[in-house]
Image (cartoon, grey):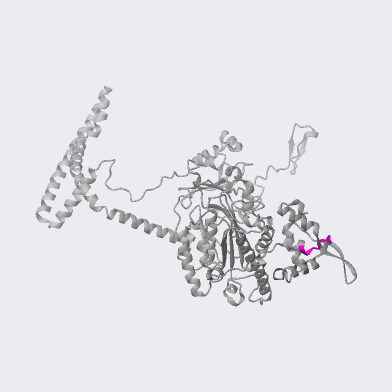
Amino acid sequence: MKHARPDDTPVQTSLPPPYAVPLVDKPDDRSGHGLTDRIHGVKRRPIVPTWARSRRDLRSSARWLGGYVGHVSAYHAVRVPWYAVRLSLQAPRGTARFVGGSLRWVADAEGGPLRQAAATREDVEEYLKLSRQRDRRVRWRTVVGVLAAVFGAATALALYVLAPAWVLAVAGVVLTLAFGRLGQPADAPVIHRAVDIPRATKLTSDIVLRALGALGIPAINQAQGKGGSGFSFTAPITRDGPGWLAEGDLPYGVTVADVLDRREKLASGLRRPLGCVWPEAVPDEHTGRLRLWVGDQDMSRARQSKWPLLAAGSVDLFKPQPFATDQRGRWVGQTLMYVSGIIGAVPRMGKTFLLRLVLLIACMDLRAEIHAYDLKGTGDLSPLARVAHRYRAGEEEDDIAYALADLRELRAELRRRARVIRELPKDLCPESKVTSPLADRKSLGLHPIVIGVDECQKWFEHPQHGAEFEEHCTDLVKRGPALGITLLLATQRPDSKSLPTGISANATVRWCLKVMGQIENDMVLGTGSYKRGIRANTLAWADKGIAWFVGEGADARVVRCVEVDAPTADALTAQVHELRARAGRLSGHALGEEVETSASASYDLLTDLVAALPAGKAKAWSEDIVTRLAELRPEVYSGWTAEQLAAAVKPYGLRTVQVWGTADGKGANRRGLRRADVLKVLAERDGDTAAA
């Protein structure tokens, strides 16, 4: 049967009508797009390489080159006397080698094995040809040798008679060193390298294809088994920083995530340490586009440049500040304003060091108010105590009360800042958020506030105050960034209890060091990160301080955080303390002040609700409840509204319901709480079901 194509060209098919397949592709349209369409869709490569456009990279390269030349020069300069002694001792051997080599050259000794081989084969013609060649060589080489000896002796005699003493001395030294160089053993050179150059194999297409073929991915193996490459390079393999960069397309149906799952096998196929091999997806491309960067050295062992902020003095948190380097050694920065952050990792991978580093950056902005909480209680954040507005180490009840009092003050500060921003003229605050010029104005009180909490799960899992901690932190994460308040939470247990959903879903900056599985990975880096190939569980145990970083408007990337040890942190905060003292920017704990935690900091909302709900009433209006709460603890509940009560009980799982009641002799339905619901939540929290 014949089917008509769009151009009415008949096509013969042997299939009967029920099984005929309609043709949808035009045979004469090979490209699908015109030349103009393809040109408009091309991706232009930069004319000037990225490193050449970076002033910082150029300065870094210049400093490295100057340091390298200086080191090599100094290394050899101090060894010149020893070089001279060794070369002088080897000069007799070098003289003998020179004379012997010259005589062998004149006698054409190098042709001896060939003539001997011809004689052994009894090849008379070949032997005679080689003999005649030797005779010619010996004749003219003898002439050259005699002339060189005569003129050499004459020149030496003339110099000895006519030349000044210093010329003879220089000539003698040069000849001695030259003969000494000829006399040095092959396995014991006089001059050694001033640096040890790491041996890194050049990355080639054959090596890349071999490594991909060793991954055990069926589509790649099938393509290579049929004579194909299994990987289409989209650009030449190039040198990229301290490593090599390869980029190309995987076979159809194979994704970068499949390669990431086999990173250890890929490193084995490349014959490189695991910390040198970094496959990643290419942003804005299909999921089969692989970018493979192979470093010369393990990322965790490569030398990291000196942290620029050690000599900065002060910084501006409204601008990106360097805290880490990427695989290529380039600095990575992050703005600490307008964000909230999460740091997650298993123990001993550098989580606390990273939090301390970020807080150190924050304290270098002299306007910033630091709140540091070390719930592990080991004092890792203690260097910040001398500059912090609030500081506490430990998880005892007085520490919990201290933190609660601080968070309540911060919530009040949040509301005050919102009022200030709302009342400012639009020409001063056009975007309704805190800016650096506004933070400079002390009268407004809009300075940056940075809160850092290590082992934050201790707050959220607290049996009595966990819900209140969650309420405060959720509000700070959601509303704080626009008002100049940044909350940073670090945990070694990234799960739904350690990081409540309302917090993890709204954090905009994430650092994930090594974790154990997909769930923990996605809790820190965001849902779906694992499927997109962002996998912190593939980091090795030796990759301390190395993390997947999501922030500063860029795609996820692997970074190596700056390691600032405790003595360096102490010295840095001591310097910042002096600067703050001169600028009048010390407050709170740094001045020896303590937070009042007696009454308001130790209240229990659920217990107070039970007291505010009379035993004889099953439910009550929210307005009546807040009135009784204000009578019970005026320093805590004074001024509360029904809406505030609804927001305060929400983290406990309580919801206000419709309650029928009477006021001024008239019945009405209003929002309220049931006593049974409060007792049930209280019983579940305290583990005492009899209380209900």
Any magenta on residue 613? yes
Q: Nearer the viewer, residue 76 or 452?
A: 452
Give the percent coordinates (x, y) of residue 592: 54, 70
Say which quarter of the image contains residue 598: bottom right
The number of callouts visible is 0
Give the percent coordinates (x, y) of residue 127: 25, 26
Q: Quadrant of the N terminus?
A: top right
Relative to 565, 291 lies left or right: right
Residue sitting farthest toward the left: 161
Q: Quadrant of the C terminus?
A: bottom right
469 to 92, vertically: above or below = below
Asked if one can make out residue 286 in the rendered structure from this viewpoint, the answer is no
Say which quarter of the image contains residue 633: bottom right
Q: Nearer the viewer, residue 158 or 445?
A: 445
Asked if one can make out residue 474 in the rendered structure from this viewpoint, the answer is yes
Any magenta on residue 378? no
Q: Nearer the viewer, residue 288 or 445?
A: 445
Residue at (67, 67) in percent of width and height:
600
For the stretch drawn in magenta, the main secondary structure is loop
Relative to 253, 202 lies left or right: left
Give the percent coordinates (x, y) of residue 117: 27, 26
- What range is drawn magenta here? 611-618
Residue at (54, 65) in percent of width and height:
362
Residue sitting farthest toward the top: 122
Give the percent coordinates (x, y) of residue 271: 48, 40
Residue at (53, 50) in percent of width and height:
349
